Amino acid sequence: MTLNIGVIGAGRIGKVHAENLVTRINDVNLAAIADVVPESAQELARRLRVPKATAHYQDILNDPNIHAVAICSATDTHSQIITEAAQAGKHIFCEKPIDFDLERIDNVLATVEEAGVKLQIGFNRRFDPNYARVKQAIVSGEIGDLHLLHIISRDPSPPPISYIKVSGGMFLDMSIHDFDMARFLVNSEATEVYTVASVMVDPAIGEAGDVDTALIVLKFANGVTATIDNSRQAVYGYDQRVEAFGSGGAISTDNVYPNMATISTAQNIRRDLPLNFFMQRYVESYLNEMQVFVDAVLNNKPVPVTGYDGRVPVLMGLAAKQSQLENRPVLIEEIG
């Protein structure tokens, strides 16, 4: 069987998924591309030889020959399109987050369950080989019982202020990936969040009501403590590392570099800077997550990142924001 899928959103991430679906994933046919900017959909469809391009995502949902959709549109459209796609009987892959509002998320998940379709949320870092190896070491007991987890996630530069104003804030835009990764690696639910955050990179970020530098401490139900170290600006590149420390040892990952070369001179020993953009750093993870989604639909398997997995990091992000504003630890149960 071949899975006919439509991509909704022809921006940066939509292009990545569309290209993978056409060139690197078997048993799938990219049947249509939709984007509110018609020229974007048409250009991508023309380049990838996709037969249908439209400005209206409903055209994809109304096509009985399309079995699934990949939602890569603006965040504020996700919950609405998921709802309509579920009601149309389409299986759904959606980029994070589902929404910033927990009540809307719950309504979406209820609709998906009622429709009986699959919903996978795009927390792609779970599918990165480095993080997968850390997960393996924890699950297998290779480092004993997990005691501490430390995640470093720093962007090379902040996004435009116009984006910051509509992003939901650092904790729901940037840290949300780290909340998901902490849950994934610890294999437990967070019970308490404490955040210390400030504006250290750009005063305009503070004027927009956000922060750009944060340290987040998470307590988990199984006793593990995790810390998340976030910055909007690491001048040396995209800084993505993790260390897990356990009773029998530790495992850590390094950044990904464009090459493995080391330069040695009389003055110093150095290497080139790490990759500078998430689209470069996580290339394989985007492919891997979509392959898993296609396989889950074709072979009726559970998706590995569920709607519930999409809800909890939003919950954690809201708790982190409340902790920062009130300067105190916040229990997850206080938020919902």
Image (tube, rainbow, N blue to C red):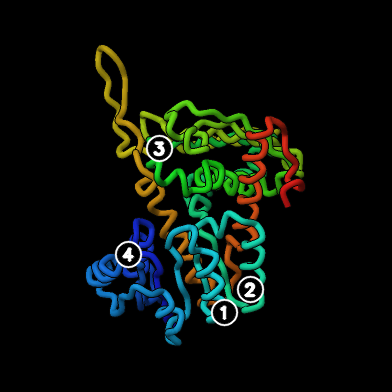
Residue identifier under label 4: 19
The alpha-carbon separation of the residues under discs 2 and 4 comes to 30 Å
Give left or right: position of 22 versus 199: left
Using the image, determine if residue 288 lies above or below residue 250.
below
- The structure residue drawn at horizontal position 48% and vertical position 48%, both measured from the top left corner, is 167
Give the number of the disc on residue 111.
2
Q: To which residue does mark 3 refer?
A: 158
Q: State the image quarter where residue 233 is shown.
A: top left
Q: What x and y, as percent, mark residue 105?
A: 62, 62
Q: Name the amino acid type tagged 3.
A: Pro
**Mark 2–mark 3 contact, CB under 8 Å?**
no
Residue drawn at x 47%, y 76% is 68
Q: Amino acid at mark 4?
A: Glu
The amino acid beneath tag 2 is Thr
- Whether residue 10 is visible, yes or no, is yes
Image spot of residue 130 (x, y percent)? 48, 44
Vertical side of 180 occupied by 261: above or below: above
Question: Which quadrant holds residue 144?
Answer: top right
Q: Amino acid at mark 1?
A: Gln
Image marks 1 and 2: residues in contact by CB distance under 8 Å: yes
Residue 153, position as x, y percentages in the image: 49, 37
Depth check: give the residue in front, 296 or 45: 45
Q: Which residue is mark 1?
A: 87
